[in-house]
Structure formats: structure tokens, C-alpha cells
Image (cartoon, rainbow, N blue to C red):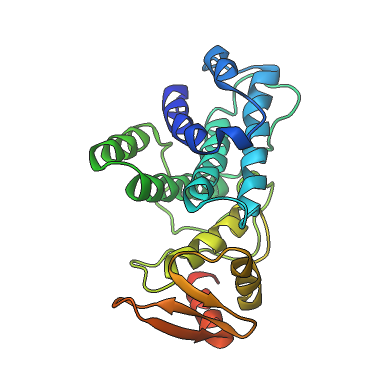
Amino acid sequence: MDFLTYSKIRAYCWQDIGPHIDTPDRETLRLMRCKLEGSRRGDIHHEAIEAKWLVEATGYLTPREHAAAVLLACVSNLYLQSNFDLPRTGNNPPPLSKVEADELARMTRDTVTDYAASYLPEREAAALVAAYEKAAPEQSPATPAPVVAVGASGGMNWTLNKPERFQGYGKPLYDLLKAAHIAGQPCPKARDVLDAWKLKHPPEVFEVTNEGLKYYDAKGNPKPADLEAIRKRIDRMAS
């Protein structure tokens, strides 16, 4: 990935979560070069870590801010891994294996596409996705390996599987699992989902209790899902 594409994607993230990130600011970004050295490269790594922290704060951000934090964590790590042969000192991420790097690229592609489709005007979204596709690192055609936590030296021992389409509370559940995966955490259990959504439940969910939740179906009517139903949903998305 080239620096121009990284900067373009980062700018969208910065508009949404800039106030939550302490470094680098716009002036720091302007001074960065394609061949990052020393603390400048470290700044990007630090920003990726900050974004990961925001991703973990699931009850703290709006849905758009959460999506921007996930995207920033992905694109920052992908840029650093794509340019790992550049000079570096200080705070830098460890290199990923080819399989891990391929999975990071796939995850970033999905994240760019989801963010653009959900929060940008149609033409702007298409332009951003096209810019990423043009600059994305070449991937191996091999079958995807388990998804790796962004910024981690090794992945958690579980795979994240994106459904072809979402129903009911499927999209926020997938986002929660994805946030845990990027943060390098174990796969959330059904009880973890309820605990997270008790603090701030997504708009697709009507009510959260200790034993389950009620979500809106396609007709807008509340429909119950107990712990077992939530567990089965998780099992279909994570393995």
C-alpha cells in the first residue's frame, strides 16, 4: 500500500475519531514521507495501538466511530507491513508471515468496503474502495487461514467468517466479534455479547436482559433470542 492511499483512508478515520487519538495530528501527517524513518514510522504504529484501544471500548463510541477505529487499526498496520523494508527504529510492529499479511489485507479490504458502504455517499464510497483496490498489496490465492489480530505477532486460535448477508442483530454481532479479533482477544461468548450490549445496545436490538435479548425482525417487530440462539449465531461467524 502506498502512502497516498493510506493518507486518504486515514483522513476519513480522523474525521470520525480524531479527538480520541492523541498522535499524530494533521500537521504530523503532512510531514510524513513515503519512506518513514524513526519516530514518524513509530507514530503510525502508536496510532494503530490507540485505534485498537478504541475498538475495545465498545460502549464508548458511536457505531460510525467504532467502524472508523477498526478501519484505522487495519489500514495503519497494513501500511507498515506493506513497507516493512523501509528504515525503522524505535516503536515498530513485528513482521507478519505471508499468511498473516494476506489475512490482514483481506480484513482491511472488508473493513474499507463496510465503512464506505455504511457511512459515505455512493460515489465517494465507490472512489474510496477503488483507491484501496488499486493500492492493495498482492495476495496469495491460497485458502484463507485463520484471521490474525491486527498488530499482534501471532493470531488468536479462531477464524472470523463474514456472512453473505446479515439478518436481525447479525451485523452488530459480527462487528463485535471483529473488534475482539482485531484486538487479539479470545472469541466472545454469548454472555460477553449481552454484557457489552447492556452498556449500549445497537439500534437493531430492542432490549437486553441477563438471559437474552430482543431484536427487530425484517418487519420491525421485536423478536427474542436466548443465550443458546446467540451462541449458535456466534458459532456460524467464528470457528
The residue furthest top is 31
Q: Is residue 213 above or below residue 148?
A: below
Q: Is residue 121 left or right of residue 160?
A: left
Residue toward you, 130 or 124: 124
Rendered-image quadrant of the N terminus: top left
* Residue under the image location 55 percent in, 38 percent down: 17
The residue furthest left is 123
* Residue under the image location 28 percent in, 36 percent down: 124
Q: Is residue 221 left or right of residue 30?
A: left
**Residue 146 visible in the shown view:** no
Q: Provide residue 206's location: percent of width, then percent of height.
A: 47, 74
The residue furthest right is 90
Q: Provide residue 143's location: percent of width, then percent of height.
A: 44, 59
Residue toward you, 143 or 187: 187
Q: Provide residue 223's location: percent of width, then percent of height.
A: 42, 84
Q: Is residue 88 above or below residue 166?
A: above
* Residue under the image location 62 percent in, 86 percent down: 211
Q: Is residue 10 above or below residue 196?
A: above
**Residue 134 visible in the shown view:** yes
Rendered-image quadrant of the C terminus: bottom right
Q: Provide residue 132's location: percent of width, then percent of height.
A: 37, 36
Residue toward you, 89 or 194: 194
Instruction: State how many labels appear.
Output: 0
